[in-house]
Image (cartoon, rainbow, N blue to C red):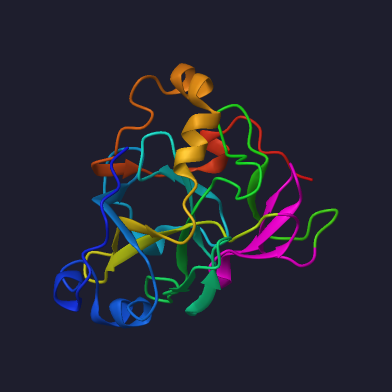
Amino acid sequence: MDRRSFMGSCTAGAACLSASSFQAIAANAQPRAYSRVLLVDERGDPLRASKLRVQANYVFHYPFEATPVFLLDLGKTASPHSLSTKDRSAYSWPGGVGRMKSVVAYSAICAHQLVYPTKDVSFISFRKTRAQRGVQDELIHCCADHSQYDPARGAEVLSGPAPQPLAAVLLEHDAKADTLTAWGTLGGEMFDEFFRRYAAKLSLDVGPQANRAVSQKAVVRELEKFCRNSVQC
């Protein structure tokens, strides 16, 4: 599985990042750069960040064909936040993008049991209001183990057995065109374990291209359209 390391110097990184984003993550982040992928709607047209419904669950796949990502407009500014992985590697999440700095993206693979949204069912999603065992509103909640993540703080774990935040997917917002481009990840990736655990299922659901890197475009869908049954708990 191809893992391209982040091009380390400020000069190399500047080609991929806006100045403000780079300053936010340069100190101690460990981003992994993948293909630059434009987010598009179901018709194949560039997705406009300002057209996202606030606090609605959107899904696309990145950096691989079978690895789902949640895309959210939180409706409020998501400021940079310091976090660490389960092996205590520190990193600085750069915050949201878009006109209000409210658009965020995270791997939709739960950091505990690797639960993820499929076309048939999803036990993990963003919730506007608290679930039965909730600690507060506006969290990503996994019904399989009741792990809860705060998307406004880099998907920090607030409750449950998850050992680390959800891996962030790094986005670039083109202010003039109002488009979004995914270019890498930040934090504790779990892709290798994900592919090992679900090899048979992914082969049936996605086919031999399950671990193929996404290139050029990624289609964004609302979770309700992508998944037949989004479980609420």
Along the horizontal axis of the image, is 138 left or right of 68? right
Classify residue 123 as left or right of residue 102: right
* Residue at screen point 55% across, 68% down: 88
> In the figure, 207 relative to 164: above or below?
above
Image position, residue 119 (x, y; %): 54, 29
Does residue 77 appear in the picture of this structure? no
Position above or below: 117 against 198: below
Q: Residue furthest right?
A: 132
**Residue 220 versus residue 174 in the image, above or below:** above
Magenta stretch?
A: 135-161
- Left or right side of 129 for 29: left
Left/right placement of residue 96 relative to residue 180 reads: right
Task: Name the image quarter holding the C terminus.
Answer: top right
Q: Nearer the viewer, residue 207 or 163?
A: 163
Q: Is residue 114 visible?
A: yes
Q: Nearer the viewer, residue 120 or 215?
A: 215
Percent of width and height locating residue 145: 75, 46
Residue drawn at the location 54% of the way across and 72% of the way down: 83
**Which residue is found at the position 45% from the left and 42% from the top?**
191
Q: Quadrant of the N terminus?
A: top left
The verdict on residue 170 being magenta is no
Q: Toward the viewer: 217 or 156?
A: 156
Residue 154 highlighted magenta (yes or no)? yes
Report x, y in % for residue 125. 63, 49
- Residue 184, horizontal then vertical, whole percent: 33, 57
